[in-house]
Image (tube, rainbow, N blue to C red):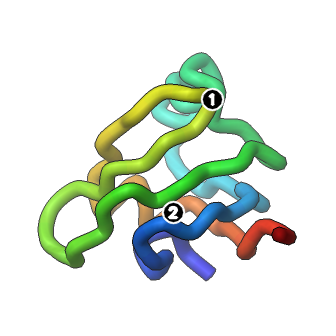
């Protein structure tokens, strides 16, 4: 599933990132890589998603979130 389809309060594991190389490298520098755990803090379906990974809160735009493939993390 795509990250933008995720639900508030749920944690997901990043499986793939399909976005232009420079933006993918920037996300990697922030710690968002394949296998990372990402928790959705606010996905109100309008504007940016607020997420937490590596202990820090980030806002990701819908275009970016549409290109991150995730699966629900095991409890």
Number of numbered discs on residues: 2
Horizontally, is 5 left or right of 16 in the view?
left
| Residue at image coords 14%, 71% | 46
Q: Quadrant of the N terminus?
A: bottom right
Q: Position of residue 18 (x, y in %)?
A: 61, 56
Mark found first going from the N terminus, 1 or 2: 1
Horizontally, is 58 left or right of 11 in the view?
left
Horizontally, is 32 left or right of 71 in the view?
left
Q: In the rendered structure, find residue 54 and report the number of the disc placed on it.
A: 1
Q: Position of residue 26 (x, y in %)?
A: 51, 24
| Residue at image coords 37%, 36% | 58
Give the alpha-carbon distance from disc 1 to disc 2, as whole Å.
20 Å
Q: Position of residue 69 (x, y in %)?
A: 64, 67
Q: Secondary structure at mark 1?
A: loop
Residue lying furthest left in this view?
46
Q: Quadrant of the C terminus?
A: bottom right
Compared with 5, 12 (above or below) is above
Compared with 14, 24 (above or below) is above
Judging depth in this view, the residue of 16 and 14 nearest the camera is 14
Check disc 2 and report the residue beneath it.
67
| Residue at image coords 55%, 75% | 2
Mark 2 burial class by Cα count in 10 Å: few <14, some 14-19, many 20+: some
Q: Position of residue 12 (x, y in %)?
A: 67, 63
| Residue at image coords 74%, 59% | 13
Q: Secondary structure at mark 2?
A: loop
Judging depth in this view, the residue of 63 and 70 nearest the camera is 70
Q: Quadrant of residue 32?
A: top right
Horizontally, is 56 left or right of 72 in the view?
left
């Amino acid at each position: 599933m795509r990250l933008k389809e995720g639900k508030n309060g749920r944690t997901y594991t990043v499986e793939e990132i399909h976005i232009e190389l420079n933006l993918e490298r920037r996300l990697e520098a922030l710690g968002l890589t394949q296998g990372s755990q990402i928790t959705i803090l606010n996905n109100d379906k309008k504007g940016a998603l607020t997420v937490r990974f590596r202990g820090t809160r980030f806002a990701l735009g819908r275009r970016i979130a549409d290109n991150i493939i995730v699966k629900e993390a095991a409890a």
